[in-house]
Structure formats: C-alpha cells, structure tokens
Amino acid sequence: MEQIILIIAALITSSISAVIGMGGGIILLGIMAILIPEGYMAIALHGIIQMVSNGTRTFVFRDHIKKNLISEYLIGALIGLGLSVFIVYGLMHIYDVRSANEIKFDYLKPIIGLYILWYLYLKGPKKERKNKLFMIVGFIGGLCSIFVGAVGPLIAPFFLRNDLNKENVIANKAACQIITHIGKIPIFIYFFNVNYIEQYTILLPLIISVYVGTTIGKKLLQSITEKIFKMTFKICLTIIAIHLILGRFLFIIS
C-alpha cells in the first residue's frame, strides 16, 4: 500500500513541479518521510527521485536552457558540495558519531525561510542580474543540499527575472537542481552508508512515475500565461517559506 501511495504522490508532485517549477519536491519529501521510517533514507531516496524528475524536466524543456547560466551554477555548486563534505566530516567528529545519519540539521530551515521572504518582499528594487551571480547561487545550493534535503525554494527566487520566461524558469532551475542532487549521491553513500542498489524496488516505479508526471505537467503549462505563472510561483514560494520558518511542512519530517 505504501508503494502505491508513493507512486501516486510522485506522479502528482512531478506534475506540479512541471507546471509551477517547484513545490512538488517538498510535498513528496514529506510523504516519503512518513512512509519511510529512517529520515535520512527518505532524504537520500528523495534525492534520486528528484534527480530524475528534474532531469526529465530539463529534457522536455531543453530548448529553453541557458548554458552560460548553468555553467556558472555548476562551478559554484561543486565548491559548495566540497565544503559540505568537510562540514559533515567535522560534525561527525564533534558529535562523536560513526554515521552522519545520527545528526539533524533542521535549524537551517527557518533561516532559509526568512531569507526567501526578505528576497521576495523586502529587498530593494531588483537590478538586472548577471549570470555570474549564479556561481554564488550554485555555491549556496551545493553547500546546503545535504543539510536541508531540497534546495529548490532556496535558489528559486533568483529565477524570477525579466529575461527568463516560464519555460526558461522551469528548464534552468531543474538543470541546476540536477547538479546538486547528483553531487549528494556519493556523500550519502560514504557518510550515511546508503546502498541505493538495495532500494531499486522503491526507486524504479517512482522514476517511471515522475517521468509520466512531468510529461503531463508540460502539457498543462502551455495553457498558463506568463503573468499567472510568475504570480503562482511567488505565492507557492511564500507558502513554502512560511512553513520553513514555523518548522511545519505539509508533513513533518522527523
């Protein structure tokens, strides 16, 4: 029964992300955290599912990719992921644990929520952004990926810019997230003792489900105007930020 719920959830949430550009990943993570007892395993498997989900979105919207933006993000993400390895290693020694899955990092979530609200509503007038900024965005995304599970809401505000239409937002945000999800895999294998091969019975049906959901979402996106898309994107980001600040997701991750 749990497997069926996860398959349906993956289908629906991947469709949501394909239409809005975000939100589906956090919902799916909450559902997985309820159905999968080990919290760290839920995050690890979620990373694989989201890698495929974002990969599918990147593929179906590939004509809207801005390669120079992605290359800048990649450089920053690699540096951030490298630094996160040193932080995890140091925390394991500080807390004297044999595996990083014994450490919780939830204290970062309210900070990210406050940052999102500041960026959306309190920051001064938005200047036209240089792609170089995405090296910094990549660094932040790579650094925080292990600690918060899903960095989509953290990097999402940077995609609200005049030179990116709705297809550009979805394609480039998805491509950036692939980088951080791929980077997490070896970290979870080495520091969290995750064996992804043993989890194939869970992963394979969900991978198929997110592909189908993304295809459905792309067709739905065509009926949404640019104005409605950006307004919905901002509203969803605001709701996610409030949940992060309050420490209450749609489903509590324990």
Image (cartoon, rainbow, N blue to C red):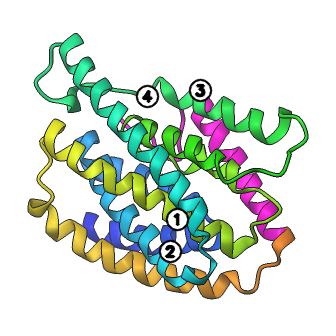
Q: Which residue is mark 3?
A: 111
Residue 11 x %, y %: 44, 75
Q: Amino acid at mark 3?
A: Ile
The reply, left or right, for residue 112 in relation to residue 12 is right
- What range of the chain is rendered magenta? 228-254
Pair 2/4: label in front: 2
Q: Which residue is mark 1?
A: 174
Q: Residue at x 52, y 31 (%)?
A: 109
Quarter of the image with the N terminus in it: bottom left
Pair 1/4: label in front: 1
Work out how far the residue at label 4 is from the one at label 3, CA to CA, in angstroms: 10 Å
Does the magenta run of residues contain 4? no
Q: Residue at x 52, y 46 (%)?
A: 138
Which of disc 3 and disc 2 is earlier in sequence? 2
Residue 196 x %, y %: 15, 58
Label 4: element kind: loop
Work out how far the residue at label 2 is from the one at label 3, CA to CA, in angstroms: 29 Å
Which of disc 2 and disc 1 is earlier in sequence? 2
Q: Which residue is mark 4?
A: 106
Pair 3/1: label in front: 1
Q: Residue at x 36, y 31 (%)?
A: 83
Does the magenta run of residues contain 237? yes
Q: Is residue 202 above or below residue 149?
A: below
Q: Which residue is mark 2?
A: 58
Label 3: element kind: helix
The reply, left or right, for residue 16 in relation to residue 164 is left
Q: Residue at x 71, y 86 (%)?
A: 222
* Residue 246 in view, yes or no: no
Which of disc 4 and disc 1 is earlier in sequence? 4
